[in-house]
Image (spheres, helix red, strand yellow):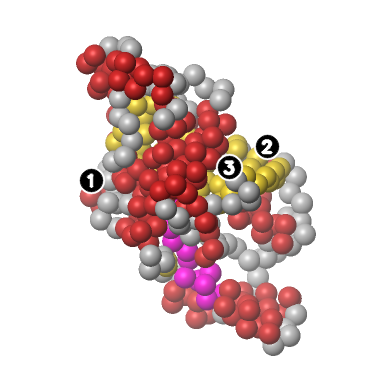
């Protein structure tokens, strides 16, 4: 027997890390969510779509199943899959949105954490971004204030102590990423922790073409049902901003979407399709499988470069 659906909850449960996809599911069912605001705008001749989901209260957080806060989604399919020039344009826009989240914070010390496993391509985004950042903490410690401006001249907007770490995954270290970051935060006392991680999406079209930025932190592995301890202001004791890119999609999603298209062609009603999909027992065989595009190697390099550009632009203006 199916459980009674809660108020404002969509009929089909979806597995995604993107707040925008959660909000879109309610819009598809013609449901307005109290306490949730959606804003959209287009940039670069409509090559970039920027969507902002603001969860304003506890009701919105409960319905969306995400913490209160701001979630900015940058969709740039043509740019993130393009050449270096397009990659830089996308990186600049991501950097501008990152500045939006940082505008009320005074940041002199920044810790960037690249979560994920270097040995698994769809999960290697965080470490890859770390490899291309302008790490400055050791330089300012060694040569003092003003060193970076002497090196970069007028190109450098500000001097930020940026340190970076790729803490690996529990299977490699035996420790939660949060445990490692707590020790680093205790020693370095950053004003902000910026976390980079790979995400899971509901839509195949959003794989490797979408970047989500949020001021609520992150729960590593949540999108694939492998929850680790949350990395946020409450757990670290300092503000946390998370930047993520969906690199995998649930196999069940692909199966259900394909079946839904087929049933629609057979003229089944929306209710009949929903009842049929909710009772398909065979989906259990793929419930733990996740799919990534065959071009993931190239896509990860391109997106990693764009996010590195975004961080360098946001905090140094270069």
Does residue 89 sit above or below 235 in this rendering? Answer: below
Q: Which residue is identified by label 2?
A: 56
Residue that appears at 60% across and 46% down: 44
Which of label 1 and label 3 is nearer to you? Answer: 3
- Foreground residue, 189 or 125? 125
Q: To which quarter of the image does residue 119 belong?
A: bottom left
Q: Does 81 sit left or right of 114 as displayed? A: right
The percent position of residue 234, horizontal first and vertical second, equals 47, 31
Residue that appears at 57% across and 31% down: 100
- Foreground residue, 247 or 90? 90
Q: What mark, if any, has residue 173 been given in the picture?
A: 1
Identify the image quadrant of the N terminus: bottom right
Q: Does 300 sit left or right of 29 as displayed? A: left
Which of label 2 and label 3 is nearer to you? Answer: 3
Q: To which quarter of the image does residue 205 belong?
A: bottom right
Q: Is residue 180 magenta?
A: no
Q: Alpha carbon of mark 1 to alpha carbon of mark 2: how far?
A: 37 Å
Q: Does 261 sit left or right of 116 as displayed? A: right
Of the two numbered discs 2 and 3 on the same chain, state the one appearing first in sequence: 2
Q: In the rendered structure, which segment of residues is drawn in magenta?
A: 243-256
Say whether marks 1 and 3 touch (CB < 8 Å).
no
The percent position of residue 175, horizontal first and vertical second, equals 27, 43
Of the two numbered discs 1 and 3 on the same chain, state the one appearing first in sequence: 3
Residue 228 seen in the figure: no
Q: Alpha carbon of mark 1 to alpha carbon of mark 3: how far?
A: 32 Å
Does residue 81 sit above or below 280 in this rendering? Answer: above
Identify the image quadrant of the C terminus: top left
Q: What mark, if any, has residue 72 been given in the picture?
A: 3
The residue tagged with tag 2: helix, strand or loop? loop
Of the two numbered discs 1 and 2 on the same chain, state the one appearing first in sequence: 2
């Amino acid at each position: 027997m199916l459980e009674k659906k809660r108020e404002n909850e969509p009929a089909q449960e979806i597995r995604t890390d993107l707040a925008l996809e959660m909000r879109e599911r309610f819009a598809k069912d013609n449901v307005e969510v109290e306490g949730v605001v959606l804003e959209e705008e287009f940039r670069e001749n409509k090559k970039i779509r920027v969507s902002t989901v603001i969860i304003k209260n506890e009701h919105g957080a409960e319905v969306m199943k995400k913490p209160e806060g701001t979630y900015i989604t940058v969709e740039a399919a043509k740019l993130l899959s393009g050449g270096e020039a397009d990659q830089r344009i996308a990186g600049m826009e991501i950097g501008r949105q990152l500045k939006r989240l940082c505008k009320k914070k005074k940041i002199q010390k920044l810790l960037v954490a690249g979560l994920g496993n270097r040995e698994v391509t769809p999960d290697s985004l965080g470490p890859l971004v770390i490899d291309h950042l302008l790490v400055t903490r050791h330089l300012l410690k060694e040569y003092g204030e003003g060193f970076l401006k002497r090196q970069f001249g007028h190109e450098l907007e500000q001097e930020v102590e940026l340190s970076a770490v790729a803490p690996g995954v529990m299977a490699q270290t035996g420790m939660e990423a949060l445990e490692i970051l707590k020790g680093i935060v205790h020693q370095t006392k950053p004003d902000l922790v910026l976390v980079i991680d790979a995400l899971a999406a509901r839509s195949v079209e959003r794989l490797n073409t979408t970047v989500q930025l949020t001021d609520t932190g992150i729960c590593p592995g949540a999108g694939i049902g492998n929850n680790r301890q949350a990395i946020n202001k409450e757990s670290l004791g300092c503000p946390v901003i998370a930047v993520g890119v969906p690199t995998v999609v649930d196999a069940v999603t692909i199966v259900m979407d394909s079946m839904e298209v087929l049933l629609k062609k057979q003229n089944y009603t929306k209710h009949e399709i929903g009842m049929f999909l909710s009772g398909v027992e065979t989906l259990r065989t793929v419930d733990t499988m996740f799919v990534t595009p065959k071009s993931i190697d190239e896509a990860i390099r391109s997106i990693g470069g764009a996010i590195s550009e975004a961080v360098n632009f946001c905090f140094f203006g270069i």
